[in-house]
Amino acid sequence: MQTSALPDLAHTAAKPVHWLATATAMAAVVAAAGLLQPEAATATASASEHRVTTRHGGAAAAKAPDPAGVTYPLDCGTVGQTVAENAPGDLDGDGGPETVAVVRCAAGSGTPPSGIYVVTQRSGAAPRVVATLVDPARKLAVTDFAVRDGRVSATLLGYSSEAVPRCCPDELESATWQWKGNAFVKSADPAGSTARSA
């Protein structure tokens, strides 16, 4: 057996007093860290509360209408309706958000035609449809739907004739609607077609 060239170290044969001193020192470090942590957490929470209050001006933000409980002017027979997409936005600049919903029949397969509807809700009243931007009777599919800066935008996919298979739309239109006066004006149409409010 080869002996170590190093001298014996005192801590290699530690006594219970040594372990007790080590445990006490560790407990002191943990306790000190615990005392500092709540103060830092309180400061972070206060900063977050300040940011929220500043962003919303101290008042609760108005809630956009829920599009799920609305009956849309869309005849789906017994299959019912489904809200495929929706997005909130203040479209008329009154400070209260509306909800824009892309709605279609709840068909089991395929891509049924969609409608785009604007839903509003007065205080204490049920949400209701106030404008139809795309009528499902046009037999269009809706993609790239968004609501930004008071505008509604979507890509509309359609068919040039009844002979075109329903799987493969051959017409594409990018459309944007914006509230002007008392109607939503569609900017993609040179004639400026409108969807009157209800």
Image: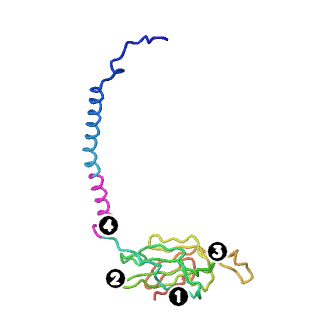
Magenta span has 61? Answer: no
* SS label for mark 3: strand
Q: Which residue is mark 1?
A: 73
Splitting the image into 4 quarters, where does residue 120 fall?
Answer: bottom left
Quick check: 32 above or below 178?
Answer: above
Mark 1, other Cα within 10 Å: few <14 / some 14–19 / many ≥20: some
Q: Which residue is mark 3?
A: 172
Q: Which mark is residue 123?
A: 2
Earlier sequence position, callout 4 versus callout 3: 4
- What stretch of residues is rendered in magenta? 42-59
Residue at x 62%, y 84% (from the top left corner): 138
C-alpha separation, residue under disc 3 versus residue under disc 2 = 39 Å
Q: Amino acid at mark 3?
A: Leu
**Pair 4/3: label in front:** 4
Q: Position of residue 172 (x, y in %)?
A: 64, 74
Q: Secondary structure at mark 4?
A: helix
Q: How is the image coloured?
A: rainbow
Q: Residue at x 29, y 39 (%)?
A: 30
Residue 189 in picture, x, y percent from top left: 57, 80
Left or right of 119? Residue 20 is left
The amino acid at mark 4 is: His
Which circle, 2 or 4, is nearer the viewer? Answer: 2
Label 1 residue SS: loop
